[in-house]
């Protein structure tokens, strides 16, 4: 069961449930955070509340493709984990040391008990499906990072899975690790969506395929896929470090790191289209723009 938000015929945002047979049922909640609150108040799971809400109601006539999908949750904060896949460790070594096999602090964090966790985005900076991703004006090496996102409640329980794009400036990141916040956080540098797959309906969250495609004009200039089975850590371990002695908002998203990196000579251009797909969750598409052109 997936949760989406779309613009209804009356022009307002509408939360809805999508069943396995792709039927779409409007839900009587303003947003995903209200659904989470109901779950917390009533001591029932999100799935139980959704099933009760749609029982006896009729699905929409429209298909998913016909809807204008929105950011499925306005998470106050999006956090991210880094260097959780071998591929990412090698890419970080390349951009900072000039060689994928160089030994660096990235090797240390890959092996350490404590994972790398950083603040990626806030409500105002995060965008949804089809919204434009912006490029930084002071970077010449920018890439998408396709990642599985965990949606957690305020106790840190994983209530859903979504797709996230942790846009990154590899030149800024590689110049000095202390520049990480600038390499990661700027306006429209994080997209999330198009749906939240309820955790209770997922059999094996360590078997999500992630596919990333980049289009330039009519041409596909990049495509690669990977699988969450390659993750070095467990999701609970990442959440545990995020919530340790910390307070998180309900509906917080924790991105779990990238397992796909475009070739080292690749940088995103204005006009590109980034598509990240996780079968079972959906396809997150965003065009790329220069901020100066906005
Ligand atoms: O250490 C830098 C961040 C790495 C990251 O974002 C990732 O591995 O996905
Ligand atoms: Mg990342």
Image (cartoon, rainbow, N blue to C red):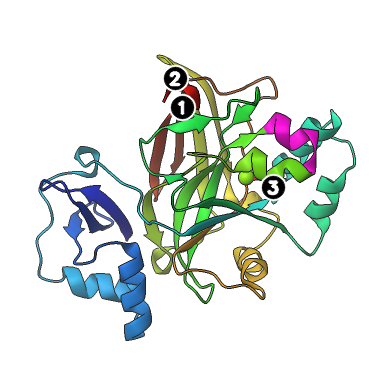
**Can you give x and y, in whole percent of width and height, for residue 234 in the image?**
64, 63
Q: Residue at x 63, y 21 (%)?
A: 266
Q: Quadrant of residue 14?
A: bottom left
Report the quarter where the N terminus lies: bottom left
Q: Residue furthest top?
A: 218
Residue at 33% of width from left, 57% of height from top? 2
**Dot 2 beta carbon under 8 Å from ligand 2:** no
Q: How many neighbours does mark 1 have within 10 angstroms: few (below 14), some (14-19), or many (20 or more)? A: many
Residue 188 higher or lower than 35, as above or below: above
Q: Which residue is mark 2?
A: 271
Q: Position of residue 28 (x, y in %)?
A: 19, 67
Mark 3, ligand 1, within 8 Å: the answer is yes
Q: Secondary structure at mark 3?
A: loop
Helix, strand or loop under label 1: strand
Residue at x-position 58% and y-position 39%:
145
On the rendered image, what quadrant is the C terminus found in? top left
- Residue occupied by mark 1: 288
Mark 1 → mark 3, Cα distance in angstroms: 26 Å
Q: Tell which circle, 1 or 3, labels the residue nearer the N-terminal end.
A: 3
> For this view, does 21 lie left or right of residue 191?
left
Q: Nearer the viewer, mark 3 or mark 2?
A: 2
Q: Which residues are magenta?
A: 170-177
Give me the residue at 35% from left, 75% from top: 37
């Amino acid at each position: 069961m997936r949760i989406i938000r779309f613009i209804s015929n009356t022009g307002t945002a509408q939360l809805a449930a999508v069943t396995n047979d792709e039927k779409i049922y409007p839900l009587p909640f303003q947003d995903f955070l209200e659904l989470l609150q109901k779950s917390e108040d009533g001591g029932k799971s999100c799935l139980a509340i959704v099933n009760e809400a749609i029982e006896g109601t009729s699905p929409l006539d429209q298909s998913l493709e016909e809807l204008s999908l929105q950011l499925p949750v306005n998470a106050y904060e999006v956090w991210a984990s880094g260097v959780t896949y071998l591929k990412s460790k090698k890419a970080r070594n390349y951009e900072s040391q000039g060689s994928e096999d160089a030994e660096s602090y990235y090797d240390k964090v890959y092996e350490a008990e404590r994972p790398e966790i950083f603040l990626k985005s806030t409500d105002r900076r995060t965008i949804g499906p089809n919204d434009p991703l912006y490029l930084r004006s002071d970077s010449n090496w920018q890439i998408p990072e396709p990642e599985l996102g965990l949606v957690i409640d305020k106790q840190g329980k994983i209530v859903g899975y979504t797709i996230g794009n942790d846009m990154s400036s590899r030149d800024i990141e590689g110049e000095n690790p202390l520049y990480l916040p600038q390499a990661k956080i700027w306006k429209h540098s994080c997209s999330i969506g198009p749906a939240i797959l309820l955790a209770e309906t997922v059999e094996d969250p360590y078997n999500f395929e992630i596919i990333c495609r980049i289009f330039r004009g009519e041409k596909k200039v990049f495509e690669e896929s990977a699988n969450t089975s390659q993750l070095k850590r467990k999701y609970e371990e990442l959440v545990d470090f995020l919530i340790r002695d910390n307070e998180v908002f309900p509906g917080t998203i924790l991105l779990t790191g990238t397992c796909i990196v475009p070739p080292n000579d690749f940088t995103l251009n204005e006009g590109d289209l980034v598509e990240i797909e996780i079968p079972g969750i959906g396809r997150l598409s965003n065009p790329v723009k220069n901020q100066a052109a906005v």
